[in-house]
Image (spheres, rainbow, N blue to C red):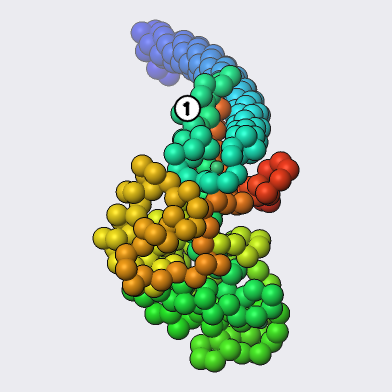
């Protein structure tokens, strides 16, 4: 039997111990790493939570700031709207007052003659008001051709048809649509030939409508009358009007084109000469006007006059950011105070 080698035994023991110790050491290191990893994970998780909370807080602040900004903007907008409405109301009130002032000036005016050297014809210089200014002017509505004259007492007025025909020819407009205007104004439903139009023609349009069979309330109503279009109305507008009664033309205020339409045979140079003459010495009566007409020129006595009953007053008022223009038709009767027939807001 062979005796055991002590050194070999000792070596085996040392080796076992070493492995044991190594195992423990490894376990210890692994434990350490596990703990470190755990701590790291906890730290990362905490960081993530903290980050999320921070982003949420920032979002809440941003939303709150946006909401506050929106509310402030809305509030500002509302205040501006209120201010605009207030400015508009003030501007409207001042414009209406200016037109009433115009009516008072007409009341004070002598009514035997109406010419452009009179006080009512002077343009109102801009007057400062609280928060703005107002200006305005009055024009004689009877210096123009009254389209409603075409039908008088239910019948066609041939004199007035001739006057409008002369104007349209001078303005290079085909006068063929005058009968349609006569039909628009007259009370019956019988078509005036050629060129007339009553319900039958207008009801065939899309959309259909009926003939008015009454006076025009406004020159723009011509858009509804057969044969009148934008171009024709644009050309006519400086020389025609729509008054609520038959009227005569005031030769102290009529422009040259209207004088030429009124007087048979009157040429432009003579019409300009008449206007220059009346600028210095207004026609004091109808005979005075007739005397000034060139030889051969004729005018019907009932078609003209040297004074007026109807005037257009325009007022332009500015208040803050609001600027409004109003136009009125004023009627000044032979006696009594001037009345407003209509008042409307217009484009400047
Ligand atoms: Ca006068
Ligand atoms: Ca008719």
- Mark 1 crowdedness (10 Å alpha carbons): few <14, some 14-19, many ≥20: few
Q: Is residue 214 left or right of residue 125?
A: right
Of the pair 13 and 42, the residue shown nearer to us: 42
Quarter of the image with the N terminus is: top left
- Residue 130, given in percent of the width and then of the height, sits at 58, 19
In the picture shown, does residue 30 fall above or below 185?
above
Q: Give percent across and percent down for residue 90.
A: 64, 29
Vertically, is 72 above or below 237?
above
What is the quadrant of residue 324 in the picture?
top right
Q: Which residue is mark 1?
A: 126
- The residue located at (43%, 46%) in the rendering is 282
* Residue 305 visible in rendering: yes
Where is residue 212? Give x, y as percent: 67, 75
- x 36%, y 58%: residue: 292
For residue 6, side relative to residue 127 (left or right): left
The furthest residue to the right: 336
Direction from residue 106 to residue 296 in the image, left or right: left
Check disc 1 and report its element: helix, strand or loop: strand
Q: Residue at x 58, y 46 (%)?
A: 112
Q: Nearer the viewer, residue 285 or 46?
A: 285
Q: Quadrant of ligand 1?
A: top right
């Amino acid at each position: 039997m062979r005796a055991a080698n002590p050194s070999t035994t000792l070596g085996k023991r040392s080796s076992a111990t070493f492995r044991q110790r190594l195992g423990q050491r490894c376990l210890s290191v692994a434990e350490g790493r596990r703990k470190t990893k755990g701590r790291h994970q906890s730290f990362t998780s905490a960081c993530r939570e903290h980050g999320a909370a921070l982003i949420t807080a920032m979002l809440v602040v941003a939303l709150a700031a946006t909401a506050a900004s929106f509310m402030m903007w809305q509030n500002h907008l509302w205040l501006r709207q209120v201010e605009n409405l207030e400015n508009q109301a003030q501007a409207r009130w001042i414009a209406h007052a200016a037109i009433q002032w115009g009516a008072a000036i007409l009341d004070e005016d002598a009514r035997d003659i109406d010419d452009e050297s009179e006080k009512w014809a002077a343009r109102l210089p801009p007057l400062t008001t609280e928060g703005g200014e107002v200006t305005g002017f009055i024009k004689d509505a009877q210096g123009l051709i009254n389209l409603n004259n075409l039908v008088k007492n239910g019948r066609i007025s041939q004199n007035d048809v001739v006057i409008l025909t002369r104007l349209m020819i001078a303005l290079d407009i085909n006068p063929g649509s005058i009968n349609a205007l006569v039909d628009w104004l007259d009370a019956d439903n019988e078509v005036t030939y050629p060129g007339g139009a009553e319900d039958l023609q207008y009801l065939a349009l899309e959309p259909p409508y009926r003939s008015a069979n009454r006076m025009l309330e406004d020159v723009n109503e011509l858009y509804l009358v057969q044969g009148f279009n934008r171009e024709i109305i644009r050309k006519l507008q400086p020389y025609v009007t729509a008054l609520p009664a038959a009227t005569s033309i005031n030769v102290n205020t009529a422009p040259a084109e209207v004088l030429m339409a009124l007087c048979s045979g009157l040429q432009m140079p003579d019409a300009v000469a008449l206007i220059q003459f009346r600028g210095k010495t207004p026609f004091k009566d109808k005979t005075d006007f007739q005397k000034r007409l060139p030889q051969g020129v004729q005018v019907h006595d009932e078609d003209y006059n040297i004074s007026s009953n109807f005037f257009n007053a325009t007022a332009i008022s500015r208040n803050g950011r609001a600027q409004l223009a109003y136009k009125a038709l004023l009627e000044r009767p032979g006696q009594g105070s001037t009345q407003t027939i209509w008042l409307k807001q217009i484009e400047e």
